[in-house]
Amino acid sequence: MTMFLIEVSLPRTEAMSRIQNAVRAIGSHFASHADWRPRGGAFVGTMFVDLPDDRAALMIVPPAMREGASIHSVAALAA
């Protein structure tokens, strides 16, 4: 398995309603368990996951939030 950082950026004006709608509609694990913080004019949600590939990581993100999602492979630095 590979560790991935999932990052989703939502415009500040839409963020809270989109997060709440995702949780209500599908019980979104990402929306309810991501760490959300303001950055500039947006809210950014981040989550680390251990999955087989980046496609599986993207599937954690609710469909309405995937457009603003980025997936980054994370590896430990070797000494």
Image (tube, grey):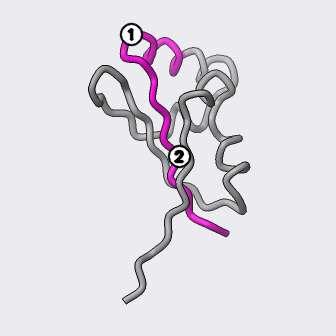
32 and 12: which is toward the camera: 12
Crowd tier of the residue under label 1, counting other residues whose Cα lies within 10 Å: few below 14, some 14–19, many 20 or above? few
Secondary-structure class at tag 2: strand
Farthest residue in the bottom direction? 79
**Quadrant where the N terminus is found in the figure:** bottom right
The residue depicted at 32 percent of the width and 33 percent of the height is 37
Residue 69: give x, y in percent of width and height: 55, 36
Image side of residue 11 versus residue 52, left or right:
left
Q: Which mark is residue 54?
A: none
Q: Amino acid at mark 1?
A: Thr
The residue depicted at 49 percent of the width and 34 percent of the height is 8
Secondary-structure class at tag 1: helix
- Looking at the rendering, the stretch of residues picked out in magenta corresponds to 1-20
27 and 4: which is toward the camera: 4
Residue 60: give x, y in percent of width and height: 66, 41
Residue 39: give x, y in percent of width and height: 29, 30
Query: Which residue in the structure is indicated by mark 2?
Result: 6
The residue depicted at 56 percent of the width and 48 percent of the height is 71
Q: How many marks?
A: 2
**Quadrant where the C terminus is found in the figure:** bottom left
Image side of residue 39 versus residue 44, left or right:
left
> Is residue 57 on the magenta stretch?
no
Vertical placement of 28 versus 33: above or below?
Answer: above
Mark closer to the chain start, 1 or 2: 2
Q: Which mark is residue 13?
A: 1
The image quarter containing residue 59 is top right
Crowd tier of the residue under label 2, counting other residues whose Cα lies within 10 Å: few below 14, some 14–19, many 20 or above? many
Residue 15: give x, y in percent of width and height: 44, 18
The residue depicted at 49 percent of the width and 12 percent of the height is 17
Vertical placement of 5 versus 31: above or below?
Answer: below
Q: Amino acid at mark 2?
A: Ile
